[in-house]
Image (cartoon, rainbow, N blue to C red):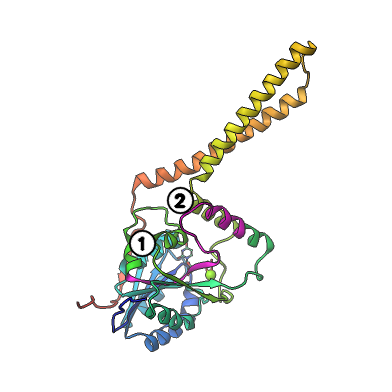
Amino acid sequence: MDTVRPSRLRLSCVIPCHNEARNLRDLLPRLCETLTDCCDAWELILVDDGSRDDTAALLKICARQPGVRAIRLSRNFGKEAALTAGLTEAAGDVVVMMDADLQHDPALIPSFIAHWARGADMVYAVRERRDDEAWFKRLGVRLFYGLLNRAGRFEVPAGAGDFRLLDRHVVDALLALPERNRFMKGLYAWVGHTSVAVPYQPDERAHGRSHFPPLRLIQLALDGLTSFTTWPLRAVSAVGVMLALAAFIYGAYLTLVFFVYGHVVSGWTTIVVSLMLFAGLQLLSLGILGEYIGRIFEEVKARPLYVVRDQWGRGLPPAQE
Ligand code: UDP
Ligand code: MG
């Protein structure tokens, strides 16, 4: 690859935080040490996403340290919005995003940087194994990526999360996307650029519980499917056409039976079952349509993605040409 990289590495590290005070106390010293070792200049952008513990107070104190910036959103807007807030503020030539809960090991950052220096625009950590997860979660993940990647021109890699390094080109491309529904895993894949996967095994969450219980994951999966695919709409039309055809053929057959054998086919059960089946299918189709219409509604309102309440500290100075 013939990519020219700047001689001095200016790196921004973005961390979304929702009730992570205890984790941040452990993570920040380790992270600052790693960043000092592997880059010429760095900034930390900590985004408080409406925490109810003392995360905001902690961030305010941390922001007194040179290179640490804290952004406090006015309420909980969700991880994707918090990440976007951090990306918008990042000034580095390279942005690393990671979680606050110590599941993403800072020790991986130097290898991300090495891949970037060799020409990769995006370097992402991919889970090596999922055998620590329940079987239904693994099945759900396979189903989701199977459905998401159907007939797309780009592929969203399964097992890749938000622990990644982005070159400035990728950050600018992501920020130029106007949509409100920011299913980040899909957006990373959509913007393209040369990407490299680095295998890793996430550690256990150090303190607290995951913010993504099964129900929230299902919601996220629906967001992903509706913002990156339209095949469910076509599938509904296809089912409609097949059913109409079947009804026509069956109707023709019954008419024939009536004229040839002269008796009316009886069958209360058949009528009730088929009524229920078709009513169910119609509601399902309406539901699928509704999912898409709901997203259109969210998009046309064009509200900002987040509202900033406070900002503390100073990050990297603007780049000199
Ligand atoms: N997070 C956030 N806003 C939210 C939920 C989560 O900023 O509404 C942050 C959270 O503080 C953490 C990261 O997103 O730094 C990942 O969250 P979590 O560890 O709960 O997700 P999981 O690792 O279970 O996917
Ligand atoms: Mg986590």
Q: Is residue 288 visible?
A: no
Which stretch is magenta? 141-168
Q: Which residue is mark 2?
A: 227
Q: Residue at x 24, y 78 (%)?
A: 317
Frontmost residue, 254 versus 60: 254
Mark 1, Cα crowd under 10 Å, few <14 / some 14-19 / many 20+, is many
Mark 2, Cα crowd under 10 Å, few <14 / some 14-19 / many 20+, is some
Q: Residue at x 67, y 27 (%)?
A: 275
> Residue 11, how many percent across, how many down?
34, 78
Mark number displayed over residue 147? none
Frontmost residue, 285 versus 76: 285
Quarter containing the C terminus: bottom left
Check the image and report above or below for 239 versus 174. Answer: above
Q: Measure the alpha-carbon separation of dots 1 and 2.
A: 15 Å
> Residue 250, how many percent across, how many down?
69, 24
> Residue 4, how many percent across, how many down?
30, 78
Q: Magenta stretch containing residue 95, yes or no?
A: no
Mark number displayed over residue 174? 1
Q: Magenta stretch containing residue 152, yes or no?
A: yes
Left or right of 230 on screen, residue 127: right
Q: Residue at x 32, y 68 (%)?
A: 169
